[in-house]
Image (cartoon, rainbow, N blue to C red):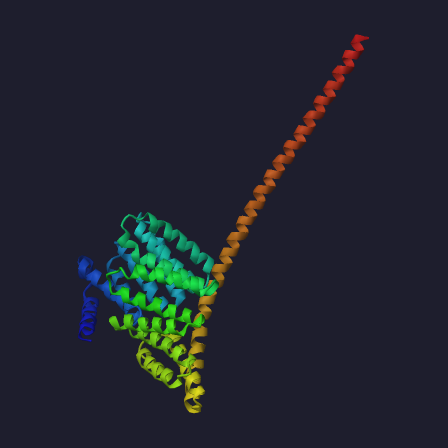
Amino acid sequence: MKARFKVTIKILMLLLLPVAVLHAQNKEIDSLFSAGNFAIYEHPDLTIKIGERIVQSQKENVRTTIRAFVMISDAYSSKRDYRKAVDYLIKAQTLSGQLDDALVKIQILTKTAVQYQQLRIYGKAIRYLDDARVLITDYPLKDSVQSPLGTNYTIRGFIYKEQLDCNIAIDYFDKGMAEYSNLKTRLKNANLSIVSYNKGNCYILLSDIKMARKSFDAAIVYAKNIDAKSLYAFGLKGLAETYMLEGHYQEAITALTQAAKLSAKVGDLVLNRGIYRGLSENYLAINNWNSYYKFQNLYLITQNKIVASERKSVGISLNEQQKILDDSLEKTKQNYLFLAIALLCVLIAAVFFIFRNQQNAKKTIKDLKMAIKNHK
């Protein structure tokens, strides 16, 4: 806790530094990036402030500004505000055109794939993942691309979990974890916790409670390593689900109550919704009606907030799908136009060929008639 307090104080001191000072001190900028990325899951609003501060002080540094925009985009994704997340990612993409840097392109492609996966536009997400994978494969410094490669595998796991089969998804989750395990940053444990939690959900769908519990336990350990309360709460929520499936309702309630305390200051609506739903279901199972109604009401309130937020995301998704459809129609029109022009050319050539043959035939007949007449 003391170390965490010192980190918080250092962040505040850096944020209070004048822009001119930050502009001149690269170490402070690196420290802000480190702090901002670390705060994404617990304090995304702080990450956004840090990112905006970096952008303000680094307007002439394109590469640093791109990193800041990507970090801000990640923070908005953590807040489930996908509209703003996309806006900042577009800013990063626009600036990336000024650089000939494969690593930056890999990062942008990967983050774009993540956004499309969150918007459930899976086909487009896979295309960006494929493009990123090509650049990752060709990149000479393999240690520098372990994190995006781990994310590449992990996002494929999310997509295949929804579209194909959990066994396939788990295989990709394991590949992602293998890459994340080699990282030497504080984000290593956060990534491993997230993937372990999602593996646990897959095992629940496969009715393998033993492996699900093992995955949720691992997610909790990784979260504790970095004092990540939201990730710890997610692990407890998953663990509670295994207890409920086995009929251990009181153990499930204990785990969910602890998760609720951890998530109280985080503000993750999806996490809170899952906790409230779990508590209402478990209290219902033991016929505790007062507690059931209390948490069922909290669940419904949170669900309404999520629906309101997702409407914005649906708007983005529909607009994107419409753009894809429009692009497809435009390509189809172009193909039909090309085919029509080609057919017209063939038709003109055929008419010309027939006309020329007819003229040649008439000339031949005329010559024959003249030859016969002269012969007589």
In the image shown, does 131 or 352 lie closer to the viewer? 131
Q: Assign the C terminus to one quadrant of the image.
A: top right
Q: What residue is at 40 percent from the left and 55 percent from the top?
A: 129
Horizontal and vertical percent for residue 144? 27, 54
Q: Is residue 180 left or right of residue 80?
A: left
Residue 112 seen in this snapshot:
yes
Q: Is residue 34 above or below residue 352?
A: below
Q: Is residue 37 above or below residue 107?
A: below
In the image shown, does 180 or 118 lie closer to the viewer? 180
Q: Report which quarter residue 150 is drawn in.
A: bottom left
Residue 62 seen in this snapshot:
no
Horizontal and vertical percent for residue 290? 42, 91
Q: Report which quarter residue 146 is drawn in.
A: bottom left
Q: Is residue 269 left or right of residue 54?
A: right
Horizontal and vertical percent for residue 274? 40, 77
Horizontal and vertical percent for residue 371? 76, 12
Count of picture labels: 0
The outermost residue toward the right is: 376
Q: What residue is at 71 percent from the left and 23 percent from the top?
A: 359
Q: What residue is at 31 percent from the left and 53 percent from the top?
A: 104
In the image shown, does 163 or 95 lie closer to the viewer? 163
Q: Is residue 45 left or right of residue 1?
A: right
Q: Assign the N terminus to one quadrant of the image.
A: bottom left
Q: Report which quarter residue 35 is drawn in.
A: bottom left
Q: Is residue 232 above or below residue 142?
A: below
Q: Is residue 71 left or right of residue 371?
A: left
Q: Is residue 5 above or below residue 342?
A: below
Q: What residue is at 27 percent from the left and 50 percent from the top?
A: 141
